[in-house]
Image (spheres, rainbow, N blue to C red):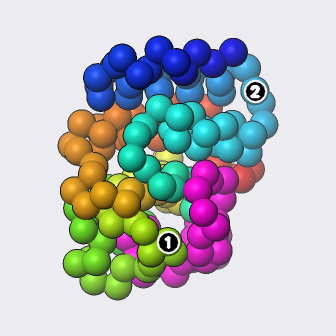
Amino acid sequence: MFKLDIIKDMNQEQRLKYMLVLIKGQISSEKDDLANISNVTGIIMSCVDRLNWAGFYILRDKELVLGPFQGLPACNRISICKGVCGKAVESRNVQLVPDVHLFPGHIACDSNSNSELVIPIIKDNKVYGVLDLDSPIKNRFTKLEEEYFIKLVEILNEKINWDNI
């Protein structure tokens, strides 16, 4: 059972640490990888404020395909090198974008999104996709969040067989 009422009194780092604890607990006993990453999106949306979208894009045949998410309907497919997600895959680097409207080639799946944080999912030197977070607030994402979301992907990489997704 999730106890989320306690996060209202936590600071940002405490919330992020708690989010990781919840995720570790959630995925520790479930064997289905799709169920696990689906629940991860729910945990993110419950623990991190001021988001309007959190989800996964999975790399298939040199294209990112929409995976489990929370938020409004999103783009089904994103080409590599297109948008923030495609750039994260192409560069194999985190993309922390304070204002998506200034990002060359930004893809506006939700016109309310103003900032974005994208963590590439890389396991055994292979790119499997991205974890994508959007916010309606410019300059929303911090280096601290970047650090914790990198840790989140590392936790998932220990448990998830991305080839099954």
Q: Is residue 139 above or below residue 48?
A: below
Residue 93 position in % (x across, y down): 31, 58
Q: Nearer the viewer, residue 3 or 117?
A: 3
x, y percent for residue 152: 45, 35
Q: Depth check: 126 or 43 in front?
A: 43
Give the side of residue 124 with respect to residue 32, left or right: left
Q: Which segment did they paint magenta?
A: 58-85
Q: Is residue 93 left or right of residue 30?
A: left
Q: Quadrant of residue 23?
A: top right
Residue placed under numbered mark 2 in the picture: 30
Q: Residue at 53% across / 59% down in the picture?
A: 129
Earlier residue among tags 2 and 1: 2
Relative placement, left or right, of 53 versus 116 is right
Nearest to the observer: residue 99 or residue 85: 99
> In x, y percent, where is residue 115?
31, 62
Amino acid tagged 1: Asp
Determine which of the numbered discs, if any, sits on residue 77 in the image: none
Residue at 66%, 53% in the rendered image: 68
Can you tell which mark lies on residue 110?
1
